[in-house]
Image (spheres, grey):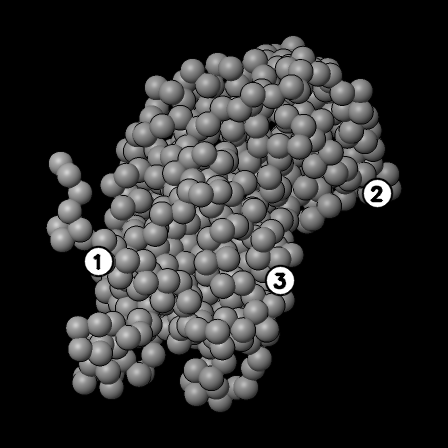
Amino acid sequence: MPYSKSMSWQSDVDELARQTAMAREMGGADGVAFQHGRGKLTVRERIDLLADADSFHEVGALAGTASWDGDRVEHLKPSNTVIGTCHVDGRKVAFSGGDFTIRGGAADAAVGNKSEFIENLALSSRIPYVRLLDATGGSVKTFEKIGRTYLPGNPAGALGVELLQTVPVAAAVLGSVAGLPAVQVCLSHFNVMVRGTSHVFVAGPKVVEQATGRTIAKEDLGDERVQLRNGVVMNAAASEADAIAQVRRFLSYLPQSVYEPPPRHDTDDPPDRREEALLSAVPRDRRQIFEPRRILEAVLDRGSFFEIGPYYGRARVTGLARVNGVPCGVMANHPKFNGGSMDIAAGEKTIRLLELCETFHLPVVYFADEPGFSVGPAQEQAGIVRAGARVVAALHQTRTPYICFVLRRLYGVAGGLHLRRTGLYRRYAWPSTHGGSMHIEGGTAIAYKREIENAPDPEAKRREIEDRLQAISSPFRNAHAFGIEEIIDPRDTRPLLVDFIEDAWKVVQTQLGPVAGLSYRP
């Protein structure tokens, strides 16, 4: 068909480009300068960090408030939410980003329900969803704008929960967020905040002052010192670029959705690598501690361990890694903190990892040195018994492949969590292994109370009994009774782990789809 200028829509296409350019100016030069002046990036600069080159596709770019001069748009103030899709390491993801240059990202400056639209797109397309959060919640200005008050509701909440059961969801806190955006921080499988510029709270300092009469700085109310240590936010970043890089790295371990296997990568790390340092990684003196991360680096694919939640529940190290290129969840007790014993925070952290791996079909690898549940009045008052029961229930509801390397101690009910009776499960013990229903040192005073008290030298009698019991605590005695299937040379840990992971890789591909009965909880 010959080209006819009179039939062309070129003028409308030009108008589309003109209005799109207006929208990309965000809150204008002054608003952008103010954002940069606080050491923060604009939403579009953040999207550039998230997206592979030339992969950004915006949805709803023209949504905004237009000023008309007759039939021509004179000015367009865009919505303060930018949504769309892009590629991250070649894989498609959906995202939303708050634009703080327009009314501080406040909800009453939104146009339409762009966030709900893109969440629906992520869910229906079965692709990961990323929130770049820099927005406040509701504002009383909304009442004046709509001419009434209203009963609060969050119809998108059900959608956010459904996303958690279906696709990976990650959130980067890149400014001060309150209200609904603060809750969205936690409606994610992974979140990260920037030191010095990010804050998370239910309500900001002025609202707190009105409600409680207390004046408090936003830093003391909800910066990284607060939110990393209480478990609301998992990781800290040195900059916005670092935060978004962590989001990209997190997604690299996860499948596009529960309907796909996790992405396997090529690796040049030999599967039969045997590290000599493992032979002395656990001290012979049971009172000495060790650094579990050194063991992880020696066993997992080199450089692949991505730690999650290092400042919360520090008695347990958790994260994602690869073994022979296969993504997996990893956890290890850390004896430097509370002796490595499971307190409420460490238990909550364990549940999060187990549910993440179960949801997205990642094998779980546990390096165990568990002295038992944390004891004492403070733990009892906080409800350690109920918290411990939740961990027991969470573990035994999992079916994803699970392997445990017993490095040293296994005591009590918490120690029993290294064992799972269903699904693909494997266990190996290092020669440093010992365990039981309770510690010999504490149990002796209870079980032999009368004998110790009646002895001429009670302290000497206690030591004598403890020495006698310690002499029969050798893991070889357990192996003789097949209480331990295999005691291994620590240097064989990686080759045996690779062997397990190859079996697990075949199993997880038969488990794809939503997990019956599992509801991922933030």
Q: Nearer the viewer, mark 3 or mark 2?
A: 3
Mark 2: amino acid: Glu
Q: Secondary structure at mark 2?
A: helix
Q: Quadrant of residue 144?
A: bottom left
The Cα–Cα distance between marks 3 and 2, rounded to whole angstroms, is 52 Å
Task: Name the side, left or right, on which 147 lies relative to 172.
Answer: left
Location of mark 2 (residue): 459
Q: Nearer the viewer, mark 2 or mark 1?
A: 1
Mark 3: amino acid: Arg
Mark 1: amino acid: Asp
Residue at point 28%, 43% (across, down): 123
Where does residue 167 sit, x and y in percent of width and height? 35, 40
- Pick whichever, 520 or 474, lies toward us: 520
Task: Name the side, left or right, on which 270 lies relative to 226.
Answer: right
The Cα–Cα distance between marks 2 and 1, rounded to whole angstroms, is 94 Å
Location of mark 1 (residue): 12
